[in-house]
Amino acid sequence: MENIRFENVSFSYAVNDKTVLKNVSFDVRQGEFCLVIGKSGAGKSTLLKLIKKEIAPAGKLIGEIVTADNVGYVAQNVQESIVTDRVRSELSFGLTNMGVDANTVELSVAEAASYFNLSNKLDNDICSLSGGEKQILNLASVMIMKPSVLVLDEPTCQLDPVWAQRFLTVIKRLHRDFGTTVIISEHLLEELYEYVDSVMLVEDGEIKAKLPSDEMTKFLKETDNPLLKSLPLRLRLFDGTKSLFECRSIIKSKSLPSICDDDKRDEKAMTVKNLCFAYKKNNYVLSELSLNIYKGKINAVLGPNSCGKSTLFKVCAGVLRAHRGKVKSTGKISMLCQNPYDLFTTDLCEDEAQFGEITRFLEIDDIKNQHPYDISGGQAQRLALAKVLQTGADIILLDEPTKALDSEFKLKLAQKLKELCEQGKTVVFTTHDIDFAGEYADYISFMSGGEIVTTQKKHTFFSSLSYYTTAASRLCRGAAQGYVCEQDLEEVL
């Protein structure tokens, strides 16, 4: 018995004639865990929103959609679904609006808080929670309504690696404990890919295949699909489904030479010294922070949610004024903020950026006549990036630039960043995409509690860590020293 069924569904938004979904047919059976993959702008978000009729976008719909009556939905924007100011009231909001009696609501809130590890946060202001805690709260607020279908659209794209892993572990636990039907869109697949019952590939608004994960891996390899790059590293580098330990044994048997960084330090493009900033008096977000940014290089700043990365960028870009400390730079600074939609002020994408060479490279010419709020998260990210790159700045600050981008476009973005550095520009980005940083950054800084703990070259940095490290580094642990990115391994395997 299916919980979700699409039959010959086509959809186009009300503001233009472009068909976003084209003759889509599929079903998801009761209790199934279905992973949806596809490039940015392929139609995944539109498809998922159509499953929950209350948030279905306005437009022309052809075909038949059959879903369960009670569908829960968790969006990619952590703030998007929050409607109250306290944890307790957020959890009780849905049940109270349904007219459930106060005693039942109180018991349900206590139970949900215990299950989702929020009991000690019940009386907290939501603004005091970390990004990961807010997304867990969003999930708990949905699950307290006992949905038979849970839909999640890129739920971890704003979470740091530790919280992303925790969140996906909770999703798997919900599926095991309650048999909830789960359909989830996700770009980071290390935690999910081999757990799910099925993987559905969306391309250009069409369903290309819906297969078990092992068969989808074969399909992507046989068709030389760019999304193969988004699969877990060991599935790409080793044939079959060998365990992590088997992969390490193979790597160890090759007796690979160690990879080490040189001791050379490059010219500095920006120097931050003893920086202090607080939104509230004596509650410092940045505390005596010092950081060197190297000219003509790709510099990455990593760290957990709420450690101050975005605030640091805003101070460096002059959006916020430091309370103490200095920022010295060698040129003009431009910044891409974490939420790209914050940059949009008009009703048409063509009025947000100059469409031409940059937009063609970023593959967004087809959104020219769309409203910025009707495009996908990945398309919004690229449109905002176009605005930033067109400023001609010498130092480019990118706050979470890979958020909501597919693996193929991440490669294009990396090529553009390298090209900018070759032109003498300096790139600095924050990211929760550890593998992207490991593959393309030259220098890595780690931030915690409003301070920069260290800045090192990438092989030295990732080789020293266990949790904030790359898939390649984890794969090679104890088998090869200094191998921290896929390129390192591709050259020797």
Image (cartoon, helix red, strand yellow):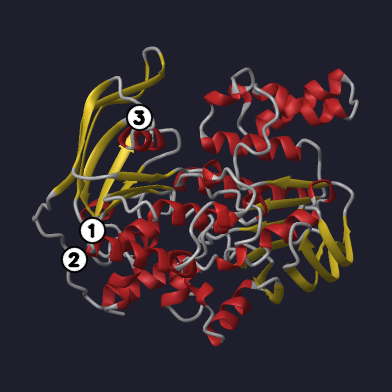
Q: Amino acid at mark 3?
A: Gly
Identity of the residue drawn at 64% across and 49% down: 347
Image quarter in which the C terminus is found: bottom left
Q: Quadrant of residue 123?
A: top right
Identity of the residue drawn at 24% across and 51% down: 461
Secondary structure at badge 2 equals: loop
> Is residue 470 visible in this depiction of the protein?
no
Give how far across and how far down residue 264 sits, in percent.
Answer: 8, 56
Query: In this picture, is 162 found above or below 154?
Result: above
Q: Quadrant of residue 289?
A: top left
Secondary structure at badge 1 equals: helix
> Label 1 near label 2: C-beta < 8 Å?
yes
Question: Along the polypeptide, which appears first: circle 2 or circle 1?
Answer: 2
| Residue ID for mark 1 | 459
Image disc number at residue 370: none
Image quarter in which the N terminus is found: bottom right
Query: In this picture, is 472 found above or below 127?
Result: below
Query: In this picture, is 207 found above or below 260?
Result: below
| Residue ID for mark 3 | 449
| Residue ID for mark 2 | 259
Query: In this rendering, would 439 be left or right of 123?
Result: left
Q: Amino acid at mark 2?
A: Ile
In the foreground, 426 or 252: 426
Tell me the distance, in whole angstroms, between the alpha carbons under discs 3 and 2. 31 Å
Query: In this rendering, would 60 be left or right of 121?
Result: right
Query: In this rendering, would 26 be left or right of 343?
Result: right
Give how far across and how far down residue 326 sits, in percent.
Answer: 21, 28
Secondary structure at badge 3 equals: loop
